[in-house]
Amino acid sequence: MATLPRVEIARFRHEGLGNSSYLLEVSPGTAVAIDADRSAARYVRDARVRGWEVVASLDTHLHADFVAGNVELHDLVGARPYLPTDAGVGFPHTGITPGERLELGDTEIEVRATPGHTPEHVSFVVRGDGPPLLCSGGALIAGGAARTDLVGPGHTEQLTRAEFRTIHEAFADLPDETVLLPTHGAGSFCSSGSKQEVTTLGHERATNPLIAETDEERFVREWPRTFPGTPAYFARMREVNTVGARPTRKIARPGALEAFAFRDAVEAGGVAIDVRKTDRYAAAHVPGSIAIELRDAYCTWLGWVVPADASLLFVMDDDVPLERVLEESMLVGYEAFGGWLDGGVRAWTEAGLAVRSTVVLEGDDLSAELEAGALPLDVREPDEFALGAVAGATLEPLGGLDARAEALPGDRRIIPYCASGLRSATAASILERHGFENVASIRGGYGTWHEAGRD
């Protein structure tokens, strides 16, 4: 009997998306990528350090939360994309079907049907010298599974039933020691799993509440109620990943714009995105700019609140790496970059152009504002709001604020707040764009307010 190869694993985590992707060494010096995202240069860099050549890119399903990296990896190193045949993608690839066994390097990879999160979803069982590896995408994750409502409301019940069968039947023959390598995880708007990073099939069988639920009707009725809010950009990502995103080297990089040219670009319809720290934005910012601090979750909120076809104009500090801003923006499908403000807000003010500022309230100030009739606006998600909120607060999750801002009262001070002050800065900037002038935020957000025992 032939000796099975030892499959080495390199894991890549995007904290903001709550997603993991992987490189698997399938034979000495040869690797395949699993559910890679568009920021594909990092896989190539890591592989080269390890002495690996990436020869293939395998996707478990059409992703809704990021632009897939399959086309990008092919452009960078010639890696062949492999996708479920039922995905119906329109770019060169190898279609794969359930029951197929792929011979990649010295390793056999079994393709299993695992519909639920999406109709075409498959999982990969990788067998080598050690426990089997289960690359499960969103079919099974630590503490849960990925949501089933992203294809459309008319498909949710059917896909939820498919997911029930998947988690109870698709992996039944695999041993408890099988190592689970999911794509979605804690922090993903595609799922609501646990924060555990490493898990096994046996651990999930013992602890995963979805596996513990054996009543299909209750599962179909109750589980979809736990899904988090759906970022607006999810609706367009499946189409992007079906057509295939163009290689990022073909996307024009923005140039530096002096203050008046930047102002003219905004007036011509460009959207100014201020990626600086929220306190710097509050102190002084370009009027009408949207505050989205460059952080792990930057791409999610950019995709949620900024139109897909917007020409992005960036306001940054000198210590902000432009390439990272662009990479994170392209990760959720943005490709039109109009420029960046040369010299930042300092150059803007030196040119004699007006800036705006946002009032940031401390705890005692907020108490006085509330007593004077200010409206606390909670821009968190409903599950966060349910755990506690500022007295008298109105819930208006950030993702839908732009569409519903006009319904807010214009004769009261509005004080958006979130958990820490990051989302509320974005909320304040959206309200400003809608013409609200009497807006403030809470330093430290609800967390600070709650810790002080004020609610």
Image (cartoon, rainbow, N blue to C red):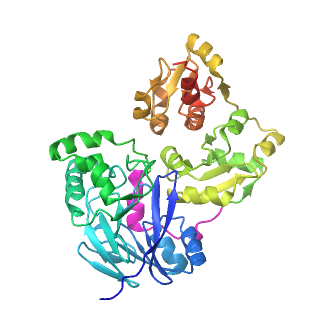
Extreme-right residue of the structure? 350
Relative placement, left or right, of 385 versus 330 is: left
Q: Is residue 75 above or below residue 407?
A: below
Relative placement, left or right, of 318 versus 395 is: right
Residue 390 in the magenta stretch? The answer is no
Residue 239 in the magenta stretch? The answer is yes
Q: Is residue 149 visible?
A: no
Identify the residue shown where x is 40% and y is 28%: 386
Q: Nearer the viewer, residue 15 or 260?
A: 15
Look at the magenta stretch and give its main secondary structure: helix
Q: Position of residue 195 (x, y in %)?
A: 44, 48
Displayed quadrant of residue 252: bottom right
Relative placement, left or right, of 286 versus 166 is: right
Identify the residue shown where x is 26% and y is 69%: 112
Q: Is residue 369 above or below residue 41?
A: above
Q: Position of residue 348 (x, y in %)?
A: 78, 43
Q: Nearer the viewer, residue 59 or 211?
A: 211
Identify the residue shown where x is 77% and y is 38%: 353
Q: Position of residue 395 (x, y in %)?
A: 44, 27
Q: Position of residue 57 (x, y in %)?
A: 43, 74
Question: Could you tell me how many numbered marks the image carries?
Answer: 0
Q: Which part of the image, by quadrant, shows the N terminus? A: bottom left
Relative placement, left or right, of 368 versus 306 is: right
Q: Nearer the viewer, residue 400 or 100?
A: 100
Q: Nearer the viewer, residue 317 or 53?
A: 53
- The boundaries of the magenta stretch are 234-253
